[in-house]
Amino acid sequence: MTNIHTLEDIATLSETLGLECKLAAGRDGKGQLPADFWPTYSAFANSRGGVILLGVQEKQGRFSLQGVSEPERVITDLFNTVNNPQKVSINLLSDQDVSILTIEGKSLVTVSVPAAHRKQKPVYLNGNPFQGTYRRLHDGDRRCDDETVKRMLAEQVEDSRDSRILIGFGLKDLDPDSLHAYRNMLAVHRPDHPWIALDDQEFLQVTGCWRQDRAQEDAGLTLAGLLLFGKWPAIQEGVPFYFVDYQEQPEDKTSQTRWLDRVVPDGTWSGNLFDFYRKVSRKLVADLKVPFVLKGNFRQDDTPLHRALREALVNALVHADYSGRASILVIKDPAGFIFRNPGMMRVPPEQALRGGESDCRNRTLHQMFLMINLGERAGSGLPKIRQGWEIAGGTIRLFDSFEPYDQTRLEMSWGRMKDETGKMTGKMTGKVFDLLVSNNALTVSELAAKLEKSESTIERAIRELCKLERLRRVGSRKSGHWEVLDD
């Protein structure tokens, strides 16, 4: 926390998703590592990392520096304990992560806990992952349930989650129309590919959709094969939490019409991923304007925007954790598009948007889409999405969340702020801005009530306004106000 230098900096602190303050006074008042330090260490490590400040007291929401009288003793205790495998499963800390700050003669110990890699998770306490694993939710440490811990353990040992053999599942569980449609598409895109001549069983085997484990003598469809080409009853049996959902929502969210169009497994189609992609990809781009551009003597109907939306859909399908409880959800809205998939990101969102690093959860699915010219090579998908969307004037936001279930969301919003006259043009962003111009003391809940929107929608609009440097917060969240900025 290099931005803490004065008592005033301490007074403005608030515990957040990535910051925790602890008194650490000990019984003798000279300083002691508090017992509740370790759940926070586990929570930060299993989330996105965070900073723990030792020597800061909270009273009625206000923070003050009390200091640690013997900080070196506390740090020695910290490293002794974190290197004890009976207490902590792994040490993520180095000397550079722990420091002492002195402010007006008082010592403050800062501990920067890095996020653990998936192969290090779960980070747990007291030798028991099912009782000692925590994650950070809002400003608190929450113990993980057994289901969450099991997913962490699976993520740790399985580089590709979709190569698992599903015992008892075979060709009878596949939708032949889906499989043959895929094979026809492959023949169109790669007419000379040697796998085109294979029969269905051989084709599934060489693509990784059917596999034999020589050591265990097990054979059958893999998770990838069932997800991509399966029939709905078989998918439900093999992947109980699987659900795909496309919604085209109206502009007026207060009307009785919840959606204008919807695609879910309803018994009228296979319900598998390949058919979901085919149905939804057409709907996503159905009303996009296509400029008149010639490539040779032919009109080019594909644009960076079309490619960005198709890539976003494929990205959600191949990175999903199909053991999770969240559904695949694709929303088309007048304000933009949302792509949600179950599972936390394996690569931090900011790194994923920059590109160059990839850790795909379902590598067989990824390869199957690549074979028919859908999706991007490792580490380039999200940068391509971002580039195509921003060319069209939109903004993009990528994040993951533990609530209500583990999920990753890609939100693609149209560019909203100004037209050629300088007038605010974004519907929700502009409405929030106009209200704050008239009354800059309005809270998020008051704005939500006035506009009849959720608080999360208002918070997104405020974040966008801050990003565009049209809004700035002055003072604390409870007692401060918004400063509306001129161009």
Image: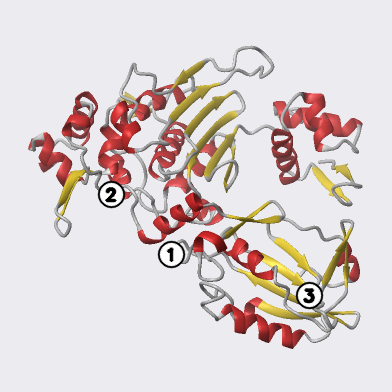
* Residue 423 in sight from this viewpoint: no
Q: Identify residue for label 1.
A: 119
Question: Mark 3, mark 1: which one is toward the viewer?
Answer: 3
The residue at 59%/65% (across/down) is: 42
Q: Name the foreground residue: 463 vs 453.
A: 453
Check disc 2 and report the residue beneath it. Answer: 164
Q: What scheme was used to colour the molecule?
A: secondary structure
Amino acid type of the residue tagged 1 in the rendering = Lys
Mark 2–mark 3 distance (CA, rounded to whole Å): 47 Å
Label 2 crowding class (10 Å Cα cut-off): few <14, some 14-19, many 20+? some
Residue at the image point whose x is 43% and y is 59% from the top = 153
In space, the residues marked 3 and 1 are separated at their CA atoms by: 31 Å
Residue 434 at x, y percent in the picture: 83, 29
Q: Secondary structure at mark 3?
A: loop
Q: Amino acid at mark 2?
A: Arg
Residue type, label 3: Ala
Viewer-closest of 324 and 398: 324
Q: Please name whichever residue, 191 or 400, is drawn nearer the observer in this view of the structure.
A: 400
Above or below, 11 against 396 in this view is below
Residue with the mark numbered 3 = 24
Q: Position of residue 285 (x, y in %)?
A: 45, 25
Asked if marks 3 and 1 touch (Cβ < 8 Å), the reply is no
Q: Earlier in the sequence, mark 3 or mark 1?
A: 3
Residue 109 quadrant: bottom right
